[in-house]
Amino acid sequence: MENPAFVHHAVVLSLILFALGTLGVFLRRNVITVLMCVELMLNGVNLAFVAFSRAQGTLDGQVLVFFVMVVAAAEAAVGLAIVIALHRHRDTLDLDAFNLMKG
Amino acid sequence: MTAADYVFWVFATATVVSGAVVVFARSLIYSAFALLFTFFGVAGLYVLLGADFLAATQLLIYVGGILVLLLFGVMLTHRIYDLKLRTEKTQLGPGLIVAAGIFIIFANAALITEWPTVGREPAPTTKEIGRLFLGEYLLAFEAASVLLLVALIGAAMIVRRKKDA
Amino acid sequence: MSGELDLRPLVPAIIVGVTGLVVLLAQAFTPKDRRAPSAPLSLTGLLAALAAVWLLASGGGRGAVLANAVSADAYSLFFQALLLGIAAVAVLLSPSYLRANGLDRGEYYALLLFSVVGMLGLVSSLELVSMFVALEIMSIALYGMAGLYRSRMESQEAALKYFVTGAFSSAFFLYGVALLYGVSGSTSLDRLEWAVSTLTTDSAALALLGAGMLLVGFGFKIASVPFHMWAPDVYEGAPTPATALMSAGVKAAAFGALLRVFGSALHALAGEWQPLVASLAVITMVVGNLAALAQGNLKRMLAFSSVAHAGYVLTALVASPGQAGEAVLFYLVVYGAVNLGAFGTIAALSREGREPLSLGDVAGMAERRPALAAALAVFLVSLTGIPVTAGFVGKFYLFNAAVTAGWVGLALVGVLMSVVSAYYYLRVVVAMYMRDPLGEDTWARVSPSATVALALSAVITLVLGIYPAPVLTLARIAARSLL
């Protein structure tokens, strides 16, 4: 069931996920959707780590994915805290509405 | 094509299509549920790449943890039946250029590169991962616990109501 | 386990982290009607960590390594001492500001200390994943500090913008780590250095892309153009002592890691990444300075100035690692002292939720607050880079490094932009000395601890301008341990 071509394809797939996430961060204005797009980018990163781990024949890449997951979880928690705090002030989560500071 | 190839393409398609839905869906809830399928698809790919334990963790942490957290965020800030969850799409031009640029350059580089493929049989990875955590990556492992503590304090501090301050 | 188990390199970070926990506990166990001794505790912890750095530097700890992931070489120790010093000054600036704005909570100090733990890890990591986790510890603690001002929308916005750009840049940093792992099979900088120097052309392209992604990740943290758009909003919205820590500490820590990764591990690719860094430096200096010209708000002006200074520092990276290291390390000391001073002056005058932010607010300050006006003038003159202040010596070494490496045009842009910057820095000095005060002096009296902090910054700025040799020697020794 092993197929070396998987590594190539998985790397390309990880790039697609990363690029999609990047596009989403630029495209979407809702903070929570932007957070989801960042998660998409991080999944792209993880897939790349696993594919490279397979290619290198070492497990280091898989271990690194756990660290990415920890960071993703921590970021999600803090991000949602900020979102909720902001929501108490203003009834919107549109990034473009947050423009008190200009210059 | 072997059976594994078919499975790979099924997971790959599911991942990309649902990823695209996350980015382009007009409703927050659609995005959140599409993200669920992306996480599942990526977990499937992990299995095909010989990362079994990681696949299980992916489901537990991303689907069970992060996605639920995101859904809580959606529900705490919106009424679920509110149809005005739409968001304007702006900056399409620059976004497309940046994303397409990244993709083209990297895909090109990835395709021309010869990946060394060491023929290692897939074997249970849990033991080796545990060894690496408490060996080479001990420091990062301990630092990650500090990170979680900081996230906990930070998040608690940010959401505390004004009157307690 | 590779490498021996030796916890010595971690002692300063452990002391700071434990102090953070003690501050939290002290807050929890202090009766409601009393004030927890957060600031003195934090200061004690930071000074103890500084003493530990001193012991490591003078004792046998030099070069100590933990599992090949952290080291206590001269380079790490130099940065650790610098960062602990910056944090100590930021702590001195905090109590009066927090009280003036009704924000006096122990959690602020705990987050400050944890962000310092992250910074210490960032500069001493020899391995990309530990470096990344350290970077995240620093960033997440700072998101919390930026959003401290719960009643002010600007502060919440600052936290949001810092967070969104921070998470976005983390993803880029990580993809860079993934690509470099794909090339070298390891995240350790030693192994990476070896792998990069023996690359085939195909994988060199991939390594270069990885390096580029890392540069984007670092670019966000040092606020270089085009990754700077968060800086003015975050610097303006965050509580001012936190802004001081961000501008001085985060920049120093990020440059410390950047120089270690690019100057040493990826040096074999220098021919490829140097033009990239040089162009980043040019647009950063030009955009930062021109945008600063247009700012009426002092905090925003200083934010764009901090963007511009990231550009000045980047110019030196085109030199050989030894020379670049010496110039960058010295400049970061200068920049830290000056920026803490400039933001500190604003913070020290804060009263009842207001702080002096416009030229009108500082007009005629020389008459009312001669000492404070003189100190702020020293900081601004030093930011401009006029001789006899540390800023001049620092910029001289930065541009000299670029010229020695053959990048004369780059240094020229730096000098030209410094001339442009004179306009917006000296405008403030002119307002303080030449204009008449407007209205009553309603600003706070500078508290004793803030006085110590500002005096310290001013003295360092002046001393380094007149007699820079000792710190330059230390910077040279530290930079040499990179090679």
Image (tube, coloured by chain):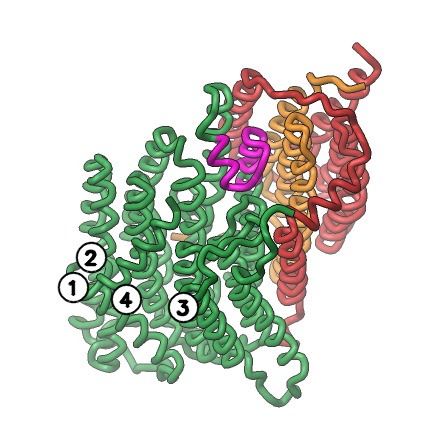
Chain colours: A orange, B red, C green
Residue C399 place in picture, x, y as percent: 22, 46
Q: Are marks 3 and 1 in contact (CB under 8 Å)?
A: no
Is C146 on the left-hand or right-hand side of C327? Answer: right
Chain at numbered mark 1: C
Is C284 on the left-hand or right-hand side of B72? Answer: left
Chain at numbered mark 2: C
Q: Secondary structure at mark 4?
A: helix
In the rendering, which numbered label is found on residue C392? 2
Kindly identify which residue carries mark 4.
C359
The verdict on residue C185 being magenta is yes
The verdict on residue C7 being magenta is no
**How far apart are the alpha carbons under marks 1 and 2?**
7 Å
Chain at numbered mark 3: C
**How far apart are the alpha carbons under marks 2 and 4?**
25 Å
Kindly identify which residue carries mark 3.
C85
Mark 2 Cα-neighbour bin, 10 Å: few <14, some 14–19, many ≥20: many
Q: Main secondary structure of the magenta part?
A: helix
Residues in magenta, as a range: C173-195
**How far apart are the alpha carbons under marks 3 and 4?**
30 Å
Seen from the viewer's position, the closer of residues A96 and C239 is C239
Tell me the mark number nearer the camera, choosing from 1 and 4.
1
- Do pointers 3 and 4 mark residues of a single chain? yes
Q: Secondary structure at mark 2?
A: helix
Mark 3 Cα-neighbour bin, 10 Å: few <14, some 14–19, many ≥20: many
In percent of the image, x 19 and y 46: which residue is there? C415
**How far apart are the alpha carbons under marks 3 and 2?**
22 Å
Can the viewer see residue C215? yes
- The amino acid at mark 1 is Val
Seen from the viewer's position, the closer of residues B59 and B14 is B59
In the rendering, which numbered label is found on residue C388? 1
Residue C426 place in picture, x, y as percent: 20, 61
